[in-house]
């Protein structure tokens, strides 16, 4: 079997070279698909090339950013890391990155793996993890995942396969906080959130209604966004767990400040990413850093030099002008991103309904596009569902004379980016279609 693994590794590497030469795809999954076909236990062998720990990150939103920050923290601390940086997070994507990174005589200190919620349990069949970081659970792609309890069940099933797993859980999420059924679990969360006075943070997006395990509705003493906050049950007394990594956040237009309090000792951090959702992602990564013995200086050094990737507050230059790219894919995530949009920029919203996006686009009506009603320049809708998006913007109160429908995504970006700053809000496969041959701001 070892001969089969090494043969597969060689074939996978050669196939990737061929794909790049022929420019047939982005190469984030096909090589992994081939590797798993030739050697079903490919990932099991790959885990032997990790000397220290395998870290998995899952959740509806924030997987890519959280795993990216964790990997960067480790790399800044001079650790060798395997990480599925480009966000291909199903089994084929994970196998792909190992196929390209692994060499027979080379070992890595850590693996940091972003995993799709539904594929986590399959990943654990082949590759046991030492840590699991869970960000949040929001309603997402109902045609693929079903309701939230279904998604939560996927993650719980994965955890049950790995009882020695160390969990880092978001205490502010009432579903995530129930995952603590292993020997070791710690919680992170915000005790308070403050916004800079210039930051518009009110949202009209609907929040999920959660019931306690006793079937009584949860209530909140503090609710930061969606279901994230300080919840409690008046009937049975269940409440948000105390945090091992409690923090306060102050959110500005394009960065956040986090004050972490660990057993009375305060640590200050600055996160150069927009939005409270990114403050949560950073706090999860900071908690992981402390869990692994890193200090404040090492973690802040990594936060200072971290660069967003692949549509997660990603910056590029197109047609000589700055373009900020923010992936949107579900009501809660989109509504939080919409709070941060510069209304003085041209705005392109590119929506597809391919399988990876989810066929059901009803989430557009639950997302707070009303945040854009005071947009000063053009709002261009694009992608397969450009017309549906334009209709949604009309009902959001955006004047029709400001709305342009251009289904071709490249042309839509060209129109917008020739006149100053552009904010680009694509769904997942729309993001993939613009991921090549653009100059990223460094």
Image: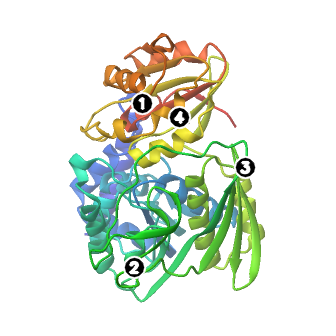
Q: Name the residue at the top extreme.
A: 401
Query: Closer to the camera, 356 or 362?
Result: 362
Residue 234 is tagged as 2
Residue 108 visible at all: no
Q: Where is residue 224 in the image (x, y as percent from the top left)?
A: 54, 59
**Are circles 2 and 1 on residues that touch, CB within 8 Å?**
no
Q: Is residue 170 left or right of residue 343?
A: left
Residue occupying the point 33% across, 30% down: 352
Label count reads: 4
Q: How crowded is mark 1: few (under 14 residues within 10 Å), some or many (20 or more)?
A: few
**N-term-proximal mark, 2 vs 1:** 1
Tell me the SS state at disc 3: loop
The image's mark for residue 371 is 4
Question: Do residues under tags 3 and 2 come within 8 Å of each other at their CB atoms?
Answer: no
Q: In the image as oriented, which residue stretches furthest toward the bottom?
A: 183
- Residue in view at x 39 percent, y 60 percent: 137
Q: Identify the disc placed on residue 196.
A: 3
Name the quarter where the N terminus is drawn: bottom left
Which badge, 3 or 2, comes first in the chain's sequence?
A: 3
| First-in-chain label (1 vs 3) | 1
User: Distance between the Cα atoms at labels 1 and 4?
Assistant: 44 Å
Q: In this view, does 57 lie to the left or right of 154?
A: right
Badge nearest the viewer, 1 or 4: 4
Decide which of tag 3 and tag 4 comes sooner along the chain.
3
Q: Which residue lies furthest to the front in this view?
A: 234
| Left or right placement of residue 197 versus residue 71 in this view | right
Q: Quadrant of residue 362?
A: top left
How far is disc 3 from disc 2 in space, using C-alphas? 33 Å
Q: Residue at x 74, y 63 (%)?
A: 269
How far separated are the C-alphas under marks 4 and 2? 34 Å
Q: Mark 1 points at which residue?
A: 21
CA gap, disc 3 and disc 4: 18 Å
């Amino acid at each position: 079997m070892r001969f089969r693994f090494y043969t597969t590794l060689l074939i996978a590497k050669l196939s990737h070279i061929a794909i790049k030469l022929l420019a047939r795809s982005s190469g984030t999954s096909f090589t992994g698909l081939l590797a798993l076909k030739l050697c079903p236990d490919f990932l099991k062998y790959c885990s032997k090339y990790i000397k220290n720990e395998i870290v998995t990150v899952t959740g509806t939103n924030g997987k890519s950013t959280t795993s990216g920050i964790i990997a960067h923290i480790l790399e800044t601390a001079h650790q060798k890391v395997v990480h599925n940086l480009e966000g291909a997070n199903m089994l084929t994507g994970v196998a792909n990155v190992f196929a390209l990174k692994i060499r027979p005589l080379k070992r890595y200190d850590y693996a940091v793996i972003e995993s799709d919620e539904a594929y986590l349990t399959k990943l654990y069949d082949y590759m046991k993890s030492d840590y699991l970081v869970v960000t949040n659970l929001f309603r997402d792609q109902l045609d693929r995942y079903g309701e939230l309890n279904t998604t939560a069940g996927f993650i719980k099933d994965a955890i049950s396969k790995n009882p020695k797993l160390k969990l880092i859980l978001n205490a502010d999420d009432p579903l995530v906080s129930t995952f603590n059924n292993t020997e070791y679990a710690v919680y992170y969360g915000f005790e308070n959130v403050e916004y800079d006075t210039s930051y518009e943070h009110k949202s009209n997006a609907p929040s999920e209604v959660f019931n306690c395990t006793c079937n009584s509705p949860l209530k909140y003493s503090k609710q930061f966004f969606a279901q994230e906050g300080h919840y409690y049950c008046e009937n049975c007394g269940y409440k948000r767990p105390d945090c091992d990594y409690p923090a306060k956040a102050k959110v500005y237009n394009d960065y956040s400040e986090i004050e972490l309090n660990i057993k009375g000792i305060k640590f200050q951090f600055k996160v150069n990413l927009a939005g409270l959702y990114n403050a949560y992602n950073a706090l999860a990564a900071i908690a992981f850093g402390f869990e692994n013995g890193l200090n404040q200086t090492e973690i802040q050094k990594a936060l200072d030099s971290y660069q967003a990737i692949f549509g997660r507050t990603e910056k590029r230059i197109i047609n000589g002008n700055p373009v900020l790219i923010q992936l949107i894919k579900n009501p809660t995530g989109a509504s939080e991103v919409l709070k941060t949009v510069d209304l003085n920029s041209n705005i392109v919203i590119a929506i597809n309904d391919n399988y990876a996006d989810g066929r059901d686009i009803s989430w557009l009506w639950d997302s707070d596009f009303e945040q854009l009603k005071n947009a000063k320049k053009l709002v261009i809708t694009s992608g397969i569902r450009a017309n549906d998006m334009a209709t949604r913007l009309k009902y959001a109160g955006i004047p029709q004379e400001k709305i342009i429908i251009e289904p071709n995504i490249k042309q839509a970006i060209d129109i917008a980016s020739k006149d100053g700053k552009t904010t680009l809000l694509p769904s997942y496969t729309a993001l993939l279609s613009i991921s090549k041959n653009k100059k990223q701001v460094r």
